Amino acid sequence: MTQFLYQATYTSDSLATQIDNPVDRLAQVGATIEKSVGAKIVGGGFSFGDYDIAVIIDADDKETMAAIAIAIAAGGAIRSAKTTPLLSGDEWVAAMTKASSVIYTPAK
């Protein structure tokens, strides 16, 4: 499984609907995406500031995460969203090790 950070901002209509009928959307959406594509919300929560929600999702691959993000966006409740692939500690160390063999000369 690959982990992704998914951050989203609700539309004003979506927030108004949630004010009228408060429910834990993390639990609802998490159950739905697990049943439909096998991905799991493994962490995160609601926030304020640039994003209203930030979650970490375990998905089989990039295509699965893209499908989740597209389906959520198509629902109309999200004004903006950002998906960031995450690396485990081991993957980060492997990338740092591999970086030492990359030949790169900065533009001057």
Image (tube, rainbow, N blue to C red):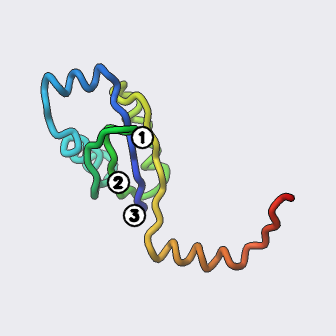
Give the left or right position of residue 32, taking residue 85 as reference.
left
Residue at image position (82%, 66%) is 105
Q: Position of residue 32 (x, y in %)?
A: 25, 43
Q: Position of residue 43 (x, y in %)?
A: 27, 56
Q: Mark 3 or mark 1, which has the lower sequence index?
A: 3
Tell me the kind of residue under disc 1.
Ala
Q: Is residue 15 above or below residue 28?
A: above
Residue at image position (13%, 31%) is 22
Mark 1 surroundings within 10 Å by alpha-carbon count, few (fewer than 14), some (14 through 19), many (20 or more) = some
Q: How many marks?
A: 3
Q: Position of residue 50 (x, y in %)?
A: 40, 38
Residue at image position (41%, 32%) is 73
Q: Is residue 99 above or below residue 34?
A: below
Separation of marks 3 and 2 at Cα, in angstroms: 9 Å
Q: Mark 3 or mark 2, which has the lower sequence index?
A: 3
Q: Report if the CB atoms under discs 2 and 1 are less than 8 Å apart.
A: no
9 or 73: which is nearer to us? Answer: 9
Q: Is residue 38 above or below residue 77?
A: below
Which one is closest to the eye, mark 3 or mark 2?
A: 2
Q: Position of residue 58 (x, y in %)?
A: 35, 58
Image mark for residue 69: 1
Which picture quadrant has residue 78? top left
Tell me the kind of residue under disc 2.
Ile
Separation of marks 2 and 1 at Cα, in angstroms: 11 Å
Image mark for residue 1: 3
Tell me the kind of residue under disc 3.
Met
Q: Can you name the residue that lies furthest to the right here?
A: 108
Q: Report if the CB atoms under discs 3 and 1 are less than 8 Å apart.
A: no
Element class at badge 3: loop
Image mark for residue 57: 2
Which picture quadrant has residue 67? top left
Image mark for residue 80: none
